[in-house]
Image: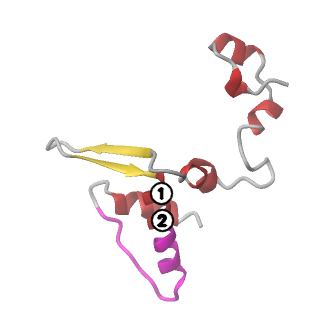
Amino acid sequence: MTKLTQFTSYADAQSHCSSAGLWELFDGDARRMNIAHECIDRHVDGDNEAVVLVRANGEDETLSFRQISEGSSRFAHFLAAPDRHFKLPHPWTLKFLQAGRGLHY
């Protein structure tokens, strides 16, 4: 069976699409899906860009999958300690993205 990622045209991928074929794209399955792993952790090899934040003042910040993964893991461990409280930072920053992902652990 050809994987959906091997088709070169949208029409071919659409005509061969199936539920089973979609699940082949993920490490997890319908019973055990870890969205943090699928969206971030499986892409941490190297220094691949995950997000580019562009601010109104013209500054930008590039975040790698590794930066988001490591920071959110630190935040999740922080939250695991008893009696921890936090405020979400604003505007969107690396800390904000890590916080949001850390809440899913």
Segment tinted magenta in the rendering: 72-89
Rendered-image quadrant of the N terminus: top right
Left/right placement of residue 93 relative to residue 36 reads left
Q: Kindly indicate whether the residue at mark 1 contacts the one at mark 2 (C-beta within 8 angstroms).
A: yes
Residue at horizontal 56 percent and vertical 49 percent from the top: 43
Residue at horizontal 76 percent and vertical 27 percent from the top: 3
Residue 90 coordinates in the image, percent (x, y) = 28, 59
Which labelled disc corresponds to residue 70? 2
Residue 83 coordinates in the image, percent (x, y) = 48, 88
- What residue is pinned by disc 1? 66
Secondary element type, mark 1? helix
Residue situated furthest front in the rendering: 46
- How did the renderer colour the structure? secondary structure
Amino acid type, label 1: Arg
Residue situated furthest bottom in the rendering: 82
- Asked whether residue 83 is drawn in magenta, I would say yes
> Height in image: 11 above or below 32?
above
